[in-house]
Image (cartoon, rainbow, N blue to C red):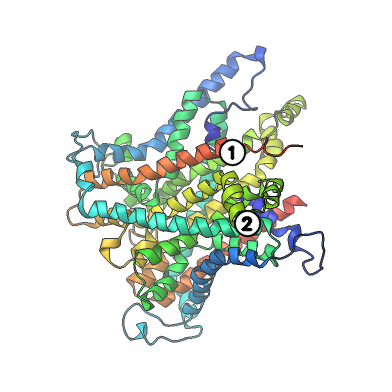
Amino acid sequence: MVDVLETPTPLERPEANEETQGKKIRKTFSNGLLLVFGLLFFAPMIWLVFASLDSQATWAVEWPHFTLSNFHTVMSGTDLQALVNSLILAIVSTAIATTSGMLAAYSLSRRRIPFKGPLLLFVLFTSGVPLTILIVPLYQLFATYGLLSIIPTAIFLAVTSLPFEIYLIKNFIDAVPEDLEEAARLERASTFQVLTRVIGPLALPGIAAAAIFGFVNAWGSFIVPLILISPSSQQPAPVAIYGFIGAANVRYGDIAAYSLIFCVPVFILYALSARLFREGFVLGGAVKG
Amino acid sequence: MASSSVHDAIIDPSAVDLWKTRKDRARFQWSSLAMLSPAFALLIILFLIPVGYAVYLGFTNLTLVGPTAVHWFYTGTQNLQRLGSDTEFRSSLELTAFFVIGSIVGVLIVGYGLASLLLRATPWVRVLVGGVVVIAWMMPAITAGMTWYASTTAQGTFATLIGLSNSDFLGSYPLLIVTIANIWSQTGFAMLVIGAALRNIPSEILEAADVENASKFQRFRLVVLPMLRPTMTAVVLLVALLSLANFSLIYVMTQGGPGNATNILPLYSYQQAFEFNNLAYGALIGNVMVIIAAVFGVLYVRVATKRSK
């Protein structure tokens, strides 16, 4: 995915002898324009970085009075607990969505299923429904059965990323040659073995990408836990960040530091998934003529 | 990616002629059903039923607190009538239209511009600028909202950069600023996808256009744009759906204010349900959002199927 940042392109490739003055000027111009864009995109992030390192931070952007104490402050007590809650929420949700998503994807990809077309359309439909509308009925449902807590919320978050995960994994399983599966069947492999020993490893980039999607989705969710989790000790980091802003005594440096820490896992996972996609499939040699 | 899977779903040969018993095809196995059931049970219990329930709740008098929190009942079209005469709802619709359409236009233009400029850029510029834009896209909504709040309020980064450090852009042009913030946070995705599509245009086709003496603009309009159309429609659909459902970014930046200046449908629905305690009316506003999302979906499928003919 991030290939766009690296690979040279057909549009670019200049004829060897035609490196004219005009082309050079154009290139300088587009580089300059890009840097302006880059600066504009970077500008909002400046506050985040400066304030996190500033012992006297405010909403204003100014050169920091350098300190690391903001990071120390937020990595303890209830703030740390909120990060742990986020982790629980994201891991439980990812595990449920990816496991059930993979089983469904395999079945939809390889098996003969009545009404497969409508089923896939239903999955597509669910991925397009605005989540906000589910909040009221789920609040009602969870409140009735006393489920306003972290694990039921994690299960619901799993469902919100499930449709896309099914599609993503199905696309990858579709690309695994059936011959490999048949070979395993001839060796009397059970369906479970086919899934864990053949399909699993070969569709791993897709499964990992789906898991990363699910994790990031649950990790960043704000309104869902805000409403569906009632005990404040179970609230995840985004709700904690929001709480910082509303506090009587706003600690700007802490907000910035905490937000940066909160971003780190997401950045790492995205970088990993970009790499997974680039390596892609090395299946070429697996099936011989 | 999304566009091709829509197609696979609609035109899937194995879904047709189901009941003819053909011996040369795989038979239905009960274990398939077992593998499907966890995912579909979850989707039905926590997605389909709540959506149906939300539709029903929209026609009741359920509240968050008070007597009708327990003893609520079906009230027919009462909420609909209220919706029809609710000026706040009408203005919320207009705000939503501005926000969604503004975001689509902005993301497409900036995303395409960046993608095509990046193709020609020197490597270090490409990595630096591309990296910053992608980081903006990856940033969780709550953090993005906060950084934009901090940088557009009085004394914020933008005010300081321009030299008018006391001007409060967010307070003066709230809708415009939240739309720009939304464009900022979604452009990275569009840039990556459009960039990949641009690189897939065979250079022979572009050279052929040059041989035919096509002008720059003709080459763009008659060659590049048609080839980008599938990607562009997919980007439009995604940006439309994500913007329509965008809650966190605006909630953190303005909470729908000042006044009701940024109170787009998801925020208005939340406000009615959980701040004014009017769960049923909030659900009804949510239903309006589902209808709008469905319209986008149908339009998308239309455009996508037309293309394949």
Disc 1 on helix, strand or loop?
loop
Badge 1, how many Cα within 10 Å: few under 14, some, many 20+?
some
Q: Which mark is residue B242?
A: none
Q: Is residue B175 visible?
A: yes
Most foreground residue, A182 or B152? A182
Circles 1 and 2, Cβ within 8 Å, touching? The answer is no
**Position of the C terminus of chain A by quadrant:** top right
Disc 2 on helix, strand or loop?
loop
The residue lying at 19 percent from left, 33 percent from top is A66
Most foreground residue, B143 or B101? B143
- Is A101 left or right of A256, judged from the image as shown? right
* Rendered view: A51 above or below B124: below
- Is A4 left or right of A45, judged from the image as shown? right
Most foreground residue, B180 or A139? A139
Check disc 2 and give the amino acid type: Ser
Q: Which mark is residue A190?
A: 2
* Rendered view: A169 above or below A127: above
- In x, y percent, where is residue B285? 47, 70
State how far apart marks 1 and 2 are (Cα). Answer: 27 Å
Please give the residue where the numbered disc 1 appears in the rendered image.
A280
Most foreground residue, A201 or A158? A201
Using the image, name the chain to which the residue with label 1 belongs: A
**Position of the N terminus of chain A by quadrant:** top right
Q: How many marks?
A: 2
* Rendered view: A48 above or below B207: below
Using the image, name the chain to which the residue with label 2 belongs: A
* Rendered view: A27 above or below A147: above
Name the quadrant containing residue B229: top right
- In x, y percent, where is residue B213? 75, 26
